[in-house]
Amino acid sequence: MVTKKTVKLILLLCFLIIYIGHWFYKSTLLYPDTGELDILGLNRLSWVFGHLTQLPLIDFGFTLTSLSFGLGLCLIILFIAYRPKDTKTYRTGEEHGSARFATVQDLIKFRDKEPQNDMILSQNARMGLFNKRLGFAVQLNKNGIVFGPPGDGKTRNLVKPNLMQANASFVTTDPKGLLVHEVGHLLKEEGYDIKVLDLVTLSNSSQFNVFHYMTSELDIDRVAESIINGTKRSDNKGEDFWAQAEAFLIRALIGYLYFDGKVLGEFEPHLGLVADLLRKLKRQDPEEASEVEQLFKKLEERLPGNYACKQFDLFMANFGGQTLMSVLAVTSARFSVFDHDAVRNLIRTDTLEMETWQIRKTAVFIAIPETDPAYNFIANLLFTTMFRVLPNLADEILQGRHPQYGPKDLIHLRLILDEFAQLGKIPYFVEALSSVRSREISIWAIVQAINQLKTSYRDEWQTILNNCASLIYLGTQDEDTMKYCSMRAGKQTIATTSSGQTYSQQGSSSVNVQSNSRDLMTPDEIARIGVDETLVFLAKQNVFRDKKYNPDTHEKAHLLADSPEDKARWFTYKFPMTDIDEWHLLVNHEDSEVVDEDTVKKVA
């Protein structure tokens, strides 16, 4: 806004400029005539500047010419000062997009100074695992999503090299069951405890008992939800009435085992006992309480108002009679899997020792079947338990509440989940993904295509992607995955030329250069990257196109095994699952002696 004060100041400056122009013109007239040709008057101006101190500053002998010269000078200065300014923003060469391929130099800043502290993303792309060792500008979360169909090197070029780093504790799914044999020797040499949860053969396996990790009645709901989600055969939820009835019953039975076994310490409970309780819930005589009803009555007497009895009372009050039989049939079918002796042996006690994974270096391999997901719900339940137990333990340590360990003792835990979709929807996974970063836990979810995420996490798949600072693309045939990666790569500005020519008598030709927008990589170009190539997307960075990592170039490659024929490095293990197994493991059978019946009688 122009004020009166501003107008007065401008007028004053104009008068001053007009006078200066008048004075310069009059001063040039004093230049001595030397007869030299000076069309532009440059010699006169030079003479005036050379004699400024000798010329009079006051000259009111105005003439029409001197005033015209001063007025012209004033107008020129005003035009320069108040000419229209171009306020537009120009980004030459980036008019339609600024995407480009990242270089090795661009990504070096994400590396740790010590190579063994890095996560391996590709042959030349690495990311430091410990943010405290990195500058603030490159501190990203360590969660990642990996796209790669079977045969594109997920295990060889990505999972195995990161295990070879031996810079954290690891939990990794092992669909083929070979990974532990190939890297186990290396990890043992690095001082790791090795656990194997074998959901393929259900034998020679570490054992997982979820009750071992239940510390409050709140865990009852989490366990029940995980089992229901993990054992459902389809996404059809059925009527809410039946789903709620079954949920009441499952919570009640799991709750009974928790309170009677864990709280009162009567026995070591396990999920197989739920199937036993279901068989004893039906009344043999309509007028007499069933065995299970009597058990709940005794529990109420010992622990009045406990959560399990409340759930059971609600179930019996609202879903009794013929409804009970229908619900009982559905629930019994769900828990019939625990009738197998092999499954019971797997879950009757706990040898995974989850509470030690971030205190001492541990590698846990979870063998999951690629074609038959019947027992994958156990892995689902394991991860649900992990996402509760491990953050709580980390909080105790980081907040100084742990009686034995401090923050310096906390080991980073990496979850590398190959064939992530086989695990089904893990309860609270999205919440865990966004919160475990501060607890020294990171998660890599490896899927074949983005549609697998959409299937399991319909309304949350984008949140999963948003919580992963790294995305590694190994290959795909899925259209949605190609389009997503193309979008992530961004658009670039390119120059296009068009030419024209006329063939008339005089003839002419023209060349026109324009800037246009183009995807840095179109979806079909995403699909056509080399078999040995990978695309690495890091948050806030351009896409990096590189070779897949070759594990043979790793400094510890000599510790890997390739086949059972490599007996020196092929890792084998034996986990006793019963008392007999343990006895066989401890006894030296070479020193055993076979005795006959008469000898036994003499000893007796």
Image: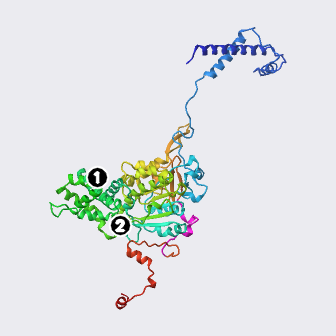
Count of marks placed on residues:
2
Identify the image's colour scheme: rainbow, by chain, secondary structure or one colour.
Answer: rainbow
Q: Is residue 253 magenta?
A: no
Find the magenta span and give its range: 548-564
> Most extreme residue toward the front, as rendered?
302
Q: Position of residue 70 (x, y in %)?
A: 70, 14
The residue wearing badge 2 is 348
Q: Position of residue 572 (x, y in %)?
A: 47, 73
The residue wearing badge 1 is 305
Quarter where residue 41 is shown: top right
Q: Is residue 152 visible?
A: no
For mark 2, give the secondary structure.
loop
Q: Is residue 552 magenta?
A: yes
Q: Is residue 291 visible?
A: yes
Q: Amino acid at mark 1?
A: Gly
Q: Position of residue 596 (x, y in %)?
A: 36, 90
Residue in the foreground of this view, choosing between 499 and 90: 90
| Residue plotted at (63% across, 20% down) | 79
Residue 254 got which mark?
Answer: none
Whether tag 1 and tag 2 are in contact, CB under 8 A, the answer is: no
Q: Quick check: 513 above or below 202? A: above
| Residue plotted at (43% across, 76% down) | 585
For mark 1, give the secondary structure.
loop
Which label's residue is closer to the chain start, 1 or 2? 1
Callout 2 crowding tier (Cα within 10 Å): few <14, some 14–19, many ≥20: many
Residue in the foreground of this view, choosing between 175 and 356: 356
Q: Position of residue 471 (x, y in %)?
A: 48, 52
Q: Main secondary structure of the magenta part?
A: loop
Quarter where residue 505 is shown: top right
Q: CA distance from mark 1 to mark 2?
A: 28 Å
